[in-house]
Image: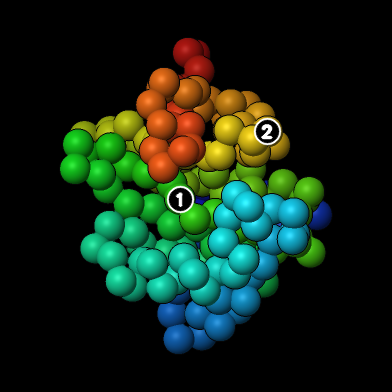
Amino acid sequence: MIDGAHLDRRGRRVTLRPVDDDNWRAVADVAPYDAQRRFVAALGARYLLLSTRSEVWTSLAVYAGEAVVGHVMWGVDDDGSHWIGGMIVDAAEQNRGVGRATVQTLTAWLSEREGNPPVRLSYHPDNTRAAALYQSLGFHPTGAMDDEEVVAEHKPHPC
């Protein structure tokens, strides 16, 4: 379990856990709002399949308390950078700080891996809510694009 000690707005602790025999169905059923489907998969199942068919991605279940509320995956690129991808927060759980807590938790965990690798993610340029969230968490566009998405890298705020 990856626990960054972040709470959602309901006071539930947000943790990231391996997808296993007990939670995979709940993760597969995670669905965003219909309007978000131009930016993310319609169901968590697509990302679960991608992570089982690819050697790059590892899926994680997003929990708020003891309930599965989302999916996120991470991977390592050829240049050693670590990536966050495939994040979906179920429509019924959005606007409660789950996405923010998920990105904060996974970014910190990936940053602390051996060699302190850069952490990157990408988002569609029209997804202004995602762009604002990521920028507020210290991600800044690199100028690169990946499959028509803006690539952003985490640059921690100076202390």
Mark whose residue sits in front, 1 or 2: 2
Q: Position of residue 3 (x, y in %)?
A: 51, 54
- Residue at the outermost front position: 148
Residue 154 visible here: no
Decide which of tag 1 and tag 2 comes sooner along the chain: 1
Residue at x 27% of width, y 48% of height: 76
Above-or-below relation of 154 to 108: above
Q: Amino acid at mark 2?
A: Thr
Work out how far the residue at label 1 is from the one at label 2, CA to CA, in angstroms: 17 Å
Which residue is under mark 2? Answer: 128
The one nearer the camera, 51 or 100, is 51
Q: Residue at x 28, y 33 (%)?
A: 116
Q: Disc count in the image?
A: 2
61 vs 28: above or below:
above
Residue 121 is situated, as x and y percent measured from the top left of the image, at: 44, 39
Q: Which percent across, then down, holds residue 17?
A: 48, 66
On the rendered image, what quadrant is the N terminus found in? Answer: bottom left
Query: What residue does disc 1 label?
Result: 85
Residue at x-position 25% and y-position 44% = 77
Q: Of the residues shown, which amino acid type is indicated by label 1?
A: Gly
